[in-house]
Every structure is written in C-alpha cells, then in structure tokens.
C-alpha cells in the first residue's frame, strides 16, 4: 500500500494566486495524474454540464451526472475514477484567496464547504445551472485575460458563485437569531478542525468559546440536529479512517496521532461508533481494489 499523496493547490493552479478555473478539457491532464488517492489542501468545485463519470470522495463513490455540482473541502481524500468524457468547469482555490478580500467572511460560512456535508452533491435545474455556468465563464475570461484588478474581480465572482451555491444547498431563509446560532456552530466546527487531535470533549471547546457546554450542545442540536459531542467524534473518526486506509502507520501510531494515549481505548472508541475494529476496517478497504488503482 502506497502512502497517500498530499497535493498542494499550487500543483494544480500552477501559479501563486491560490486560485484557478478550468474547462474540464484543460483539466484532464491533472485528472489523469490524480487518478490515485490523494489529499487536497484546497477547495474544489466541479460544475458538470454534460456526460457522466465518477469519483471517490472520502471512501464513497460519488457520481458525476449532467447538470450537477460537486463541492470538496480542504483535507478530503479524493480519487478520479471515470472522468474522460465529462464536460464542464472546475474551480480550485485556497481559503487565503477568498479571505484576502472578505476578511470577516470566512469560507466556513458556507456549510457545503465543511466536513458536516460529507458529500455535497446536487443535480440542479437547467436554468440554475446556466446561471452558475455564466459565472464560471466570466471567471475563465478574467483568469485568461489577466487585466487590471483581475484578482479582485475573481474574488468577487467566486463570492457570487458561493452565494448561489449556498442558496441551493441551504434553500430555507435564516432569521437573525438562527444566523447567529449558525455562526456559533461554524466557529465550533473551525475549532474542532484545528484541535480535534488534542481536544475530544465538548467542555474543552466550550471553554475556548466562553460558553457553557450545555448551551453549545443545545445550539448544535437546534441548528444542525447533531449533538456537539457527535460533531467532535465525527471529525476524529473521519481522520481515523483516512489514516487507516491511506497511511503506512500502525493502529497504535494512529491512535497516538489522534490523541489517544491508550491504544485499546481508541479501538473501543472506533468499534463503538463504526461497528468494526480499526484493523478490520483497514483490511476491508485494502481488499477493495477501487481504492488502489496505482
């Protein structure tokens, strides 16, 4: 088993802008190179207009259908499976590119770009796809012509695209009280993503946020219908599965990396929530050939 490759944004954008937009025909060489499991350090949005294909995103095969949108966030493990015939547009970017323009408006505001959405994928109506496509084409023109202030234009167009996508993924309007609660959950998720290897308990995050654990748990249940503790566990388990499948590390080494000093406790924790031991999970996916087309 080969170790997972970590792909930097600059390897795909081939620039220091931390952003690129491609027609899929121009992105094909990257797809051919990345048809093995790899970990993104960037966000990716695929707007597929015609034909079908498939890809692997964090252990699950995801279809690529006509008039569909697929969004991937930083840190996910990805593998292109069937991609030769798809036609559409691909955006790749780092959070820094967006944050330079919108300092107080982070990408975590868009829930479809967080780990809570395990596979944000939508098939959409023609008219809605055409609107997204028009923004992508505008971006592509700005990107290629490289005129004055094109970076500002690209950031503004990216923001427009993300707002449109958010309307599709989160169609219900939010009142002010709900929006404030949602921001709190987003902040909690950001802290989890930063500290999940060291902090495993709700009270630890509540302390950082200067709120009571019970209140944090209540808000999470109200906003996303998931308990605060479950959000933490889901992030730990997701990384555990990524490491078990794609890294040449023992279960004991993975347990230590994830903040479990006791290897047997990690084993019990994993089996409790996945109904399978870490070793059995690893064997199961090593024997699944689709994960290792190397």
Image (spheres, helix red, strand yellow):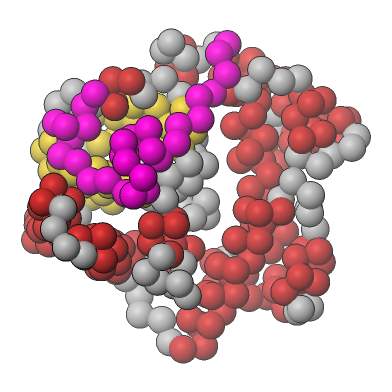
162 vs 272, nearest the viewer:
162
Q: x and y percent of residue 130 in the render?
A: 9, 57
Residue 43 shows up from this direction: no
39 vs 237, nearest the viewer:
39
Residue 265 vertical position relative to residue 150 in the rendered view, above or below: above
Where, quadrant-wise, is the N terminus in this rendering? Answer: top right
Q: Which residue is drawn at 80% across and 72% down?
A: 207
245 vs 191, nearest the viewer:
191
Q: Residue at x 79, y 54 (%)?
A: 199
| Left or right, 169 with reference to 21 | right
Residue 118 vertical position relative to residue 53 in the rendered view, above or below: below
Q: x and y percent of residue 286 in the render?
A: 57, 14
Please, which residue is most extreme toward the bottom here?
176
Q: What stretch is highlighted in magenta?
A: 1-29
| Left or right, 59 with reference to 142 | right
| Left or right, 239 with reference to 137 | right
Q: How many numbered marks are there? A: 0
Residue 185 vertical position relative to residue 234 in the rendered view, above or below: below
Where, quadrant-wise, is the C terminus in this rendering? Answer: top left
Q: Which residue is drawn at 53% across and 83% down?
A: 180
Q: x and y percent of residue 122 in the render?
A: 28, 51
Q: Hey, which quadrant is residue 103 in on the image?
A: bottom left
Q: x and y percent of residue 18 in the render?
A: 37, 48
| Left or right, 285 with reference to 278 | left
Residue 216 vertical position relative to residue 283 in the rendered view, above or below: below
Q: Which residue is drawn at 36% across and 45% down?
A: 16
């Amino acid at each position: 088993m080969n170790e997972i490759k970590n792909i930097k944004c600059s390897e795909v954008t081939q620039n220091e802008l931390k952003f690129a937009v491609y027609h899929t025909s121009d992105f094909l060489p990257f797809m051919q190179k990345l048809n093995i499991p790899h970990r993104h350090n960037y966000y990716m949005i695929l707007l597929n207009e015609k034909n079908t294909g498939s890809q692997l995103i964090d252990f699950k095969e995801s279809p690529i259908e006509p008039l569909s949108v697929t969004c991937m966030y930083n840190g996910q493990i990805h593998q292109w499976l069937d991609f030769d015939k798809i036609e559409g547009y691909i955006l790749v970017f780092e959070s820094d590119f967006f944050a330079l323009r919108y300092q107080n408006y982070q990408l975590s505001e868009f829930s479809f770009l967080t780990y809570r959405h395990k596979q944000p994928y939508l098939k959409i109506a023609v008219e809605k796809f055409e609107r997204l496509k028009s923004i992508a084409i505008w971006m592509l023109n700005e990107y290629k012509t490289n005129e004055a202030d094109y970076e500002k234009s690209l950031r503004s167009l990216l923001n427009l695209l993300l707002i449109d996508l958010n309307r599709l993924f989160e169609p219900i309007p939010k009142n002010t009280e709900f929006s404030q609660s949602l921001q709190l959950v987003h902040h909690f998720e950001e802290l989890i993503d930063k500290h999940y290897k060291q902090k495993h308990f709700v009270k630890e995050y509540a302390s950082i946020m200067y709120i009571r654990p019970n209140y944090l748990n209540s808000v999470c249940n109200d906003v996303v219908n998931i308990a605060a503790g479950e959000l933490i566990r889901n992030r730990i388990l997701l990384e555990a599965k990524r490491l078990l499948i794609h890294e040449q590390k023992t279960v004991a080494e993975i347990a230590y990396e994830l903040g479990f000093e006791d290897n047997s406790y990690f084993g019990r924790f994993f089996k409790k929530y996945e109904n399978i031991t870490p070793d059995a999970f690893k064997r199961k996916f090593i024997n699944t050939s689709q994960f290792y087309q190397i």
